[in-house]
Amino acid sequence: MNDKEAMMATGSFTVKTIQKVTHDLRAPAVNIRGFVGEVGKAVKELATLVEEHRSALPEEFLFGVSDIIEDDLQPCLHFLEKASLQFDTRINDVAEIMSGDVPEESEVPGER
Protein backbone atom coordinates (compact mmCIF):
# COMPACT_ATOMS: atom_id res chain seq x y z
CA MET A 1 0.00 0.00 0.00
CA ASN A 2 1.45 3.39 -1.00
CA ASP A 3 1.11 6.63 0.99
CA LYS A 4 -1.92 7.85 -0.94
CA GLU A 5 -3.75 4.57 -0.43
CA ALA A 6 -2.89 4.62 3.26
CA MET A 7 -4.18 8.18 3.69
CA MET A 8 -7.39 7.38 1.85
CA ALA A 9 -7.88 4.21 3.87
CA THR A 10 -7.64 6.10 7.16
CA GLY A 11 -9.74 9.04 6.02
CA SER A 12 -6.75 11.31 6.53
CA PHE A 13 -6.74 12.30 2.87
CA THR A 14 -10.37 13.41 3.02
CA VAL A 15 -9.89 15.37 6.24
CA LYS A 16 -6.77 17.15 4.93
CA THR A 17 -8.48 17.93 1.63
CA ILE A 18 -11.54 19.40 3.35
CA GLN A 19 -9.34 21.42 5.71
CA LYS A 20 -7.39 22.83 2.76
CA VAL A 21 -10.56 23.68 0.84
CA THR A 22 -12.18 25.45 3.81
CA HIS A 23 -8.95 27.35 4.44
CA ASP A 24 -8.72 28.38 0.78
CA LEU A 25 -12.36 29.55 0.75
CA ARG A 26 -12.01 31.81 3.79
CA ALA A 27 -10.13 34.62 1.99
CA PRO A 28 -12.62 34.93 -0.88
CA ALA A 29 -15.51 34.80 1.61
CA VAL A 30 -13.99 37.66 3.63
CA ASN A 31 -13.31 39.62 0.43
CA ILE A 32 -16.89 39.16 -0.79
CA ARG A 33 -18.33 40.31 2.53
CA GLY A 34 -16.01 43.31 2.57
CA PHE A 35 -16.86 44.22 -1.01
CA VAL A 36 -20.60 43.96 -0.33
CA GLY A 37 -20.16 46.20 2.72
CA GLU A 38 -18.27 48.82 0.70
CA VAL A 39 -20.87 48.82 -2.07
CA GLY A 40 -23.58 49.16 0.60
CA LYS A 41 -21.81 52.23 2.02
CA ALA A 42 -21.51 53.72 -1.46
CA VAL A 43 -25.23 53.22 -2.12
CA LYS A 44 -26.07 54.96 1.18
CA GLU A 45 -23.73 57.83 0.31
CA LEU A 46 -25.33 58.14 -3.13
CA ALA A 47 -28.81 58.22 -1.60
CA THR A 48 -27.66 60.90 0.86
CA LEU A 49 -26.14 63.03 -1.91
CA VAL A 50 -29.30 62.78 -3.98
CA GLU A 51 -31.39 63.81 -0.98
CA GLU A 52 -29.06 66.72 -0.09
CA HIS A 53 -29.18 68.09 -3.65
CA ARG A 54 -32.81 67.24 -4.36
CA SER A 55 -33.77 70.84 -5.10
CA ALA A 56 -31.02 71.26 -7.71
CA LEU A 57 -31.70 68.00 -9.58
CA PRO A 58 -34.23 67.45 -12.36
CA GLU A 59 -37.35 65.55 -11.28
CA GLU A 60 -36.83 62.87 -13.95
CA PHE A 61 -33.31 62.23 -12.64
CA LEU A 62 -34.54 62.01 -9.04
CA PHE A 63 -37.20 59.44 -9.92
CA GLY A 64 -34.75 57.39 -11.97
CA VAL A 65 -32.00 57.36 -9.35
CA SER A 66 -34.44 56.71 -6.51
CA ASP A 67 -35.91 53.75 -8.38
CA ILE A 68 -32.47 52.31 -9.09
CA ILE A 69 -31.40 52.68 -5.46
CA GLU A 70 -34.61 51.43 -3.84
CA ASP A 71 -35.77 48.82 -6.36
CA ASP A 72 -32.47 47.47 -7.67
CA LEU A 73 -29.38 48.20 -5.59
CA GLN A 74 -30.75 47.83 -2.06
CA PRO A 75 -32.55 44.50 -2.67
CA CYS A 76 -29.49 43.11 -4.49
CA LEU A 77 -27.20 44.16 -1.66
CA HIS A 78 -29.53 42.63 0.90
CA PHE A 79 -29.48 39.34 -1.01
CA LEU A 80 -25.67 39.43 -1.37
CA GLU A 81 -25.20 40.21 2.33
CA LYS A 82 -27.42 37.30 3.31
CA ALA A 83 -25.82 34.88 0.82
CA SER A 84 -22.25 35.83 1.75
CA LEU A 85 -23.01 35.45 5.46
CA GLN A 86 -24.55 32.03 4.80
CA PHE A 87 -21.50 31.03 2.73
CA ASP A 88 -19.16 32.15 5.50
CA THR A 89 -21.24 30.25 8.07
CA ARG A 90 -21.03 27.04 6.01
CA ILE A 91 -17.25 27.34 5.73
CA ASN A 92 -16.97 27.83 9.49
CA ASP A 93 -19.33 24.90 10.16
CA VAL A 94 -17.22 22.55 8.05
CA ALA A 95 -14.00 23.84 9.63
CA GLU A 96 -15.42 23.26 13.13
CA ILE A 97 -16.46 19.73 12.27
CA MET A 98 -13.05 18.98 10.76
CA SER A 99 -11.30 20.32 13.86
CA GLY A 100 -13.23 17.88 16.01
CA ASP A 101 -15.73 20.38 17.38
CA VAL A 102 -18.78 18.43 16.28
CA PRO A 103 -21.86 20.53 17.04
CA GLU A 104 -24.54 19.34 19.41
CA GLU A 105 -27.73 17.99 17.83
CA SER A 106 -29.40 21.36 18.37
CA GLU A 107 -26.52 23.05 16.49
CA VAL A 108 -26.74 21.27 13.15
CA PRO A 109 -24.79 23.27 10.54
CA GLY A 110 -27.12 25.48 8.55
CA GLU A 111 -29.74 25.54 11.30
CA ARG A 112 -28.36 28.66 12.98
Image: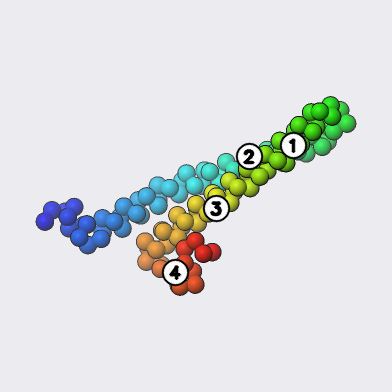
Distance Cα–Cα, label 1 vs label 3: 26 Å
User: How many numbered callouts?
Assistant: 4
Which one is in front, 100 or 77?
77
User: What amino acid is found at the position of numbered circle 4 in the picture?
Assistant: Pro
Q: Residue furthest right?
A: 55
Q: Is residue 41 visible?
A: no
Q: Dot 1: what SS?
A: helix
* Camera-nearest label, 1 or 2: 1
Distance Cα–Cα, label 4 vs label 1: 44 Å
The quadrant holding residue 19 is bottom left
User: What residue did someone put label 4 on?
Assistant: 103
Q: Earlier in the sequence, mark 1 or mark 2?
A: 2
Q: Residue at x 68, y 43 (%)?
A: 74
Distance Cα–Cα, label 2 vs label 4: 34 Å
Would you say the residues marked 2 and 4 are in contact, meaning their CB atoms lie under 8 Å apart?
no
Q: Which mark is residue 85?
A: 3
User: What residue did someone put label 2 on?
Assistant: 39
Which one is in front, 54 or 110?
110
